Amino acid sequence: MLNLPDITGAPVAVDTETTGLYPDDGARLTTVSVATEGFSAAFPFALQGAPNLSQQDYADLVTWLKKQLFWDTKEATGLLWPIGPWKLNEKNHQKEYTTSLKPVAEWLWGKKETEAEGRLKGFLSDLPKNLRKRYDLVPWPIHGPYSQQDAVLTYKLWQKQQHAVSAAVLLIPRELELEKVLYRMENRGIGFDAERGRELANGLRLTLDQLSEQLPVRPTRQQMVKYWWDEDDAAPGWLNRTDKTGQVQLDEYALWKLAKMNYPFAQTFKDYLSVKDALSRWYDEDAWVGKVGSDGRLRVDYRQNGAMTGRLSGARVNLQAVPQDHTLSSLVPSVRELFTPKPGYELWEIDLSQAELRIATSIAKVKLARHYIESGMDMHAETAKKIFNTDGDWKVEPYKKYRYIAKTTNFAVLYTAGAKTLVSQITREGKIDFTMVEAYKIMAEHKELYPEYYHETDIAASKMRERGWVQLVSGRRIYFQPWEHRFYKAFNNVIQGNVAEVMKDIMIWIERQFPGILLLQIHDSVVLEIPIDHDIETVGAIAKHMEQYTSDLFRIKMKADINPFGRNAYA
């Protein structure tokens, strides 16, 4: 029987050692270590030659942990920003921030804090190369102190947080609750039809072989360049080239334009690359299809402190980048259709429509844009009317093209993009021929139309340059360092950071009010799994809360769009 202290509600640092990173890939738990004020311990459960505890001991430990507050290492180190530590990127010799536990501990308290890791690495280095990550093979006299030390260091970081970063301390209760929400979301996963995915993969491989046979050379970019021009110098001047070697780059836009110009086999090669990319991203066994758990659920490993702005990121499978059907080649089947609900449930997505644009408009006090938003008008169409001095059906050409250019420019301003980037986005993503002269002209007219965006960009950059940080609506600060030279990005960081902060609050609210339905968070939207007999009522209540909460917070009309997600959208 475990001898655990009675400290209900106290902060406890928890660390685990496993045979791998993800249970769906076969990883299993070997050790749990905990640390709190006056107590720390490591408990082995599946280690060779260790005094392994029983399943009942494990159950008792989990019950005990549920009574405490627990703290995650990456979030603890992440909230230490900006006081350190920094590491040097060997490629570009720029300083970078690290959230790894051991560098943080060494930086704060010296190398003695990581001696146990040194002994463990010494043992692993003597093993065959393919076993050097098998921590479960390390003898308990070495493994135990190492595991226990991780929990102790994490607890010390918790204590450091209480005194080091006042702005971060205000967020700690919220981040602790969010951490639990993310763990629950990871455990739930989302249904994904791997069997159907494998059927589609077989069809894609057959298509890939057929396309390859139609090509005159081996299906690589280098071979196609040689086939078309024999020498790089003969290639058209509008093609991008690498900085170092000057070789032609056949990106998606280049292939689209070559196909439009009726270059032989350009469309076939473009289709070949699209199918190959779809297999490697979603349909191969080492892609999404092969990562589905035995329960039929696909799981993302969320990174709570995944970006400087506070946005979440994901590992293992990037479910924050589920492709829209209209972005896929006609030869590639829908990926979204493979997402499936449990029997008796439906999948829904609620999206904060144009969240970044609306929040930026409020912060910068853009009068004309606010008028369009508050009046329920299509801001992108209204922008196109002004810039191109025209009006028409924005769903057909050429008005559809004008609206796309206006929309891209509206968002490019938020990302502080220049004329070159605007040209790249419009040509490569919009497949529209667009020149630098046109970009400069449109950006100048856009600045006349909405000068407040540009003024606020300058203000945010000035604040960042003078004091090194900008503050979000939650109180969280985003810090830059003098050597980063990216102060012009400050306004964009404020916008993205504020969206990230309110989405975290919304996730916590959903989990409190409707436990168990939240499956995914995709930047400005949430994906929910709701019983069919409660779906309309539930999604309506959540959408209403999202609109009201964000509208009140940013003092501008916000809009939440409700759409069926996954297979529900194709019923």
Image (cartoon, rainbow, N blue to C red):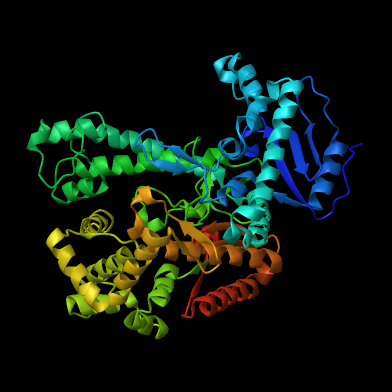
Q: Which of 92 and 281 is in front in this view?
A: 92
Residue extending farthest left = 234
Q: Which of 393 and 105 is in front in this view?
A: 105
Q: Residue at x 67, y 42 (%)?
A: 154
Would residue 89 appear left or right of 79 to someone viewing this image?
A: left
Q: Which residue is drawn at 71% across and 32% down?
A: 147
The answer to whether residue 273 shows anywhere in this view is yes
Q: Position of residue 84 (x, y in %)?
A: 52, 45
Looking at the rendered image, the quarter that the N terminus falls into is: top right
Would residue 264 appear left or right of 502 to someone viewing this image?
A: left
Q: Residue at x 38, y 33 (%)?
A: 90
Q: Which of 96 and 436 is in front in this view?
A: 96
* Number of numbered labels in the structure image: 0
Q: Where is residue 553 in the image (x, y as percent from the top left)?
A: 53, 76
175, above or below 132, in the image: below
Q: Nearer the viewer, residue 522 or 396?
A: 522
- Residue 512 occupies quadrant: bottom right
The answer to whether residue 531 shows anywhere in this view is no
- Residue 492 occupies quadrant: bottom left
Q: Where is residue 125 in the image (x, y as percent from the top left)?
A: 58, 17
Q: Where is residue 78 in the image (x, y as percent from the top left)?
A: 56, 49
Q: Residue at x 63, y 41 (%)?
A: 293
